[in-house]
Amino acid sequence: MEEEKGTLKVGVVGMGPVGQILAVHLKEAGAEVIICDHNKDLVKLIRKEGIHLEGKMAKQVMVDHAFDSIGELAGQFPDVIILAVKVYHTRTVLEELRIPGAGSPFVICAQNGIDVEEPVIDEFGEHRTFRMVLNFAGNLARTNAVNVTFFNAPNYIASVDDSQGPFAERVADLLTRAGLDTVTIDSFSLVDKVWEKTILNSSLSALCGITRLTIREAMEQPGMAEIIEQVIGESVQVAKAEDIRFGDNFVKLCMRYLRKAGNHFPSLAVDMMKDRQTEIEHFNGQFVKYGRKHYVRTPLNLLFTNMVEAHTRKGASLTPPEPLALAGMFALKDTGALREESPGSHFVGVDIGSYYTKLSVVNEAGEVVYRELLRTLNRDKNALHGALEDIKGRYEVAAICASGYGREHFPGADTTKTEVSCAAFAIDSLYPGRKNIVDIGAEDIKLIRAGDGGKVEDFYMNNKCAAGTGAFITEVAERAEIDLRTMSELAGRSEAMKELNSFCTVFAKTEIMGWIFAEMPVEDIAKGIYLSVANRIYKIRMETGLPIYLVGGVIAYHPYFKTILSERFGQEVVIPDQPQFIVSLGAALYARKYAEQEAATPGPPASEQKERA
């Protein structure tokens, strides 16, 4: 059968335990397997040694191709792409798959949680989207080796609109042929299976993470087991309200199943213990969401959701989730991939912001050849150092310029510049002439008037409070339960002109609650938040008649500002490509200028005269 259709070309994105287990079995069944992970060291190891499975399954394979960028994987034109990444990375992966000529492959969500397939449906449509429910698990024994802890056959797969049953059957046959028994079911049955597994996961994942108990340890303690049983019962009531039915003894069967579980930690608990972002939003958080929809109280699910989110924000020093911001390399639009071959000297700009650190690399012509995004407040203090070492391994680095809040504490810089100077310099390289620049950051707003050559003529910075900043938008939207990923789209549907009266985050949240109680449509609330920020910017004195450019991470993820500010200023405002990297681009261009001056100026190194402005 496989010979008639040709070899199936499968891309697997994410080389955690799930991704590695699937890749091994698909390759063993005869598929052409292309793997991708942003961890370059892992990819190099898989290229060299392949993938190993241990424990309940003992296998080893060499995959056909291994890449560390989505663009390279897409360039292989796979028939199907399996997403085995954390759910909060899905939208960024899908954005990087938008490569001209790459076509529209089938996409299989091999992820846990409720509604995880929605971003794929938005991007590729229901007819190309599949969902799997996996009943195996494992943990990394080594970087490219998985200790498979259990497999309770079978796995399930379905086309989400039941239009691609034959292809689902083809994938199921491949996996089954290699010993990973998988069956196809209809989309309605799959929803039941998804909810069933999510109920099991949500019953103790957060509990294990908070208490540091393994599944077996939690189940052996009567007090913990009672809590787990109550969480399951609470979730079942939400499922019933959604017309998802289980057998009469479902809760008892769940408890029996969990008592047989191994002495290991669930994936979400591991993420908590390693101070990483979790998928709680798609576990307990979904029962809270659907409970509110049907007026079903979910106090235990709400408790675990809030406790995990509080732990994440404090323990990992993360901001409230920004789903579109994914640490990792960014493909360049003009090439579809990072420019691995770029001869000559290169110059690095590092923008160390309050939440994220952005890196840009330019060549001698000032062209961007590389970008990378890292969390600034990260327990891994070597992340930035490792990124720079990787850049130096790729390119001949002549100079580094640091900018942003942390520029003075970055010892690897040859020179430093303020983010105001860097923003003006970068925009001038793209759009020469006098101009106004609006930079909305996580914790401040900057309005810059720049002259020819990128010289800063004047600037205003709001850094007294969070009013109008990215933090303000995130916190107020969170109170209104607005998903940041869809906030711009929601606001674009509204015709309302009601804005928040308060710029204080605390009072704004209270005002938002009043809007909710008054049953204001969520589209109007989203627009009202944007209106309040836009009007604050509009009231700041700005020279008229000059072009206006919007930059910063907030602009990158809230494009509706372009529409609303264009209306406010009565002229078209411009958002440059990759606006969140503008300051790091300016820093890279300053690094190039520094190197040119260093080469032309005899005497002491210019590094002894770093600019501290």
Image: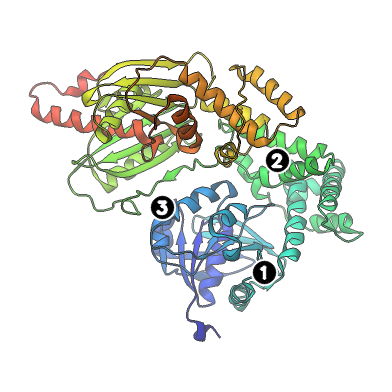
Numbered disc 1: secondary structure:
loop
Q: Which residue is mark 3?
A: 41
| Distance from the alpha carbon under mark 1 to that under mark 3 | 39 Å
Mark 3, other Cα within 10 Å: few <14 / some 14–19 / many ≥20: few
Q: Nearer the viewer, residue 501 or 586?
A: 501
Q: Is residue 193 shown above or below 236?
A: below
Name the mark on residue 162. 1
Q: Which residue is mark 2?
A: 212
Answer whether labels 2 and 1 touch (C-beta < 8 Å). no
Amino acid on which disc 3 is placed: Asp
Numbered disc 2: secondary structure:
loop
Q: Is residue 579 left or right of residue 141?
A: left
Residue at the spot 58% in from the left edge and 52% down from the top edge:
119
Q: Could you say which quadrant of the image residue 572 lies in?
A: top left
| Distance from the alpha carbon under mark 2 to that under mark 1 | 41 Å
Residue at the spot 42% in from the left edge and 58% down from the top edge:
45
| Quadrant in which the N terminus is drawn | bottom right
Answer whether labels 3 and 2 touch (C-beta < 8 Å). no
Front tag of 2 and 1: 1
| Distance from the alpha carbon under mark 3 to that under mark 2 | 30 Å
Chosen colour scheme: rainbow
Q: Is residue 354 left or right of residue 396?
A: right
Indicate the position of residue 324 as horizontal and vertical percent values.
51, 42
**Could you tell which of marks 3 and 2 lies nearer the N-terminus?**
3
Amino acid on which disc 1 is placed: Asp
Amino acid on which disc 2 is placed: Arg
Front tag of 3 and 2: 3
Q: Is residue 303 shown above or below 338?
A: above
